[in-house]
Amino acid sequence: MASRRDDIVAEERVQIALEILSPERPRGQVKQLSQRYCLSRQTLYDIAAKGHEILRQGLQPGAHGPQVNGQTIQVTKNRLRRAVLSLSEHGVSQRDTTTCLAELLDSRLSPSWVNGELAKLEAQAEQANGQLTPSSGESLSGDEIYSNGQPNLLLVGNDSLYIYALTRQEGCDGDTWGCLLLDAPRSVQFASDAGTGLLAGAKEAALTTHQLDWDHLLRPLWGQMTRLEKKAYAALEQAEKRAVLFEQSHTTRRLEQHLAKWQTLVAQAEVEMARADEFERLARTVDDCFALIDLTTGQLTDAEQGQQALQSVGQRLAGWSSRIYQKLAKNLSNWAAALFAYQSPLRQALTPLQAQYGQQAIAALSRIWQCEADDKRRRLPWPEKQKRQQIWQQSLEEAWALLGEQQLWRAWADLSAILSRTWRGSMLAECVNSLLRPLLNQRKHTDQGCLELFRFLHNVRPFGRGKRAGHSPAELAGIVLPDDPLILLGLAPKVSS
């Protein structure tokens, strides 16, 4: 039929229908259209009739408000397998999976069938994980996590959050973790939280740079600072309450009693406040060592001076009588050197930029980066904030004079990409562990297959938010994935019907 001709596209058919259906159609319009498109008059009238019917149905007013989608689906074995995988990914047990599928898809399955399908998917996930080969060459961070009394080792890329290894072992000694670290991709830096097993494993594997985690030092430090502040304010509040009671009293005996209590409470509050103030000064000293860049020179902070500062604070806290202070003192003394291990690979990463843009320009831009990083990280006192603003402005003027506008922004982008990496700890491994731990806690039994499936799904799922939004860890690690990564598990693409 002429109306089925492929050379007349949909836009032309719409135009034909509109011209014929128009009440102001000029005489002879149908004949002209017939000659232009080489169609019979009846075919043109058929196109117009079909267009009229589509318009009438499409413009028919419907019910108000949101409506249920009338699309139907065909429940196939592939759809059920994909549903089992999705429910398992979100922590639903095998028995509860059967209940969900019976309610949602009217499909009654046995827990043994669900368990068998999960076993197949886990085996496929293990095979797929072995075939994925990252090419980013990023630094790594590791962490131990326990489930059902068994230790698991997690290795994560610090730039992509790609899971390079997630394995269960019977022991967590240095030899075990050392062998696993030797099998991991070689990287310029490996970071951990100074756990005994990982620390020994890093030594056994003779890693070039083992960076300890600053967060495991600063978090308990500032947590104790918060507790001391609360304790000091509570002591002041008790003294104020006693002062109110003193004002409300009228007898000599009660006045003497409240005055004596008030004096005792004020003395206790002064002790608590002095203790909090002294601890805050020590905490500020440690926190200042966290900075990457020395604002005076624009270079990396002096590692030797930083180590001495940390050890000095540790020596002072060693005299404080409480378990938390003894632990902090021990960590400050033992971790000082390894907390600055990041400087060697970072210095190597900055060397090409210094050669390209000049050391003086990179130093000026580094000061700008550090000022902005400090401002984002914590609230600064007003005098300190003004001082940082002056440094920021002076550094910008210096960099502008040395580089010019176009080269300045190019150098800033290159420098920020390097300094913004995770250099000082294993917090990204902790982030992935925060996703894995709830799933492990919900399971009465976990094995290597469960870990392999979690690893695969984490690596191929795109991030929903943040600076990595829209990209999966595998993509960021340089791996090309199919449009539907689940086909790597032997699943067919989901087809709607």
Image (cartoon, rainbow, N blue to C red):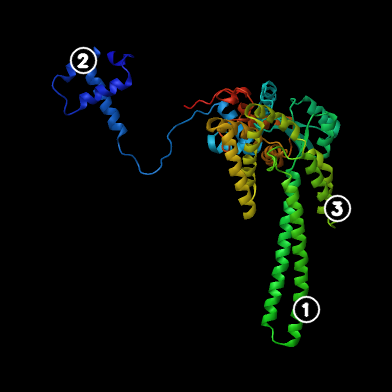
Q: Earlier in the sequence, mark 3 or mark 2?
A: 2
Q: Find numbered disc 2 in the image and state the secondary structure of the residue it sits on.
A: helix
Q: Which residue is mark 3?
A: 318
Q: Dot 3, crowdedness within 10 Å: few (<14), some or many (≥20)? A: some
Most extreme residue toward the front is 401
Q: Dot 1, crowdedness within 10 Å: few (<14), some or many (≥20)? A: few
Q: Above or below — where is 4 with respect to 311? A: above
Identity, as a three-letter code, of the amino acid under mark 1 = Ala
Which of label 1 and label 2 is nearer to you?
A: 1
Q: Is residue 199 visible?
A: yes
Q: Position of residue 142 (x, y in %)?
A: 74, 35
Q: Earlier in the sequence, mark 3 or mark 1?
A: 1
Q: Above or below — where is 58 with respect to 276? A: above
Identity, as a three-letter code, of the amino acid under mark 3 = Ala
Q: Earlier in the sequence, mark 1 or mark 2?
A: 2
The disc at residue 355 is: none
The disc at residue 34 is: 2
Give the quarter of the image for residue 458.
top right
User: 94 or 27, which lies in front?
Assistant: 27
User: 406 or 4, which lies in front?
Assistant: 406
Distance (Cα) linking label 3 and label 1: 34 Å
Give the quarter of the image for residue 20.
top left
Give the quarter of the image for residue 270.
bottom right
- Quadrant housing the N terminus: top left
Identity, as a three-letter code, of the amino acid under mark 2 = Ser
Q: Residue at left 63%, top 50%?
A: 387
Q: Residue at left 69%, top 74%?
A: 241
Q: Find numbered disc 1 in the image and state the secondary structure of the residue it sits on.
A: helix
Most extreme residue toward the left is 27
Label tally: 3
Q: Which residue is mark 1?
A: 260
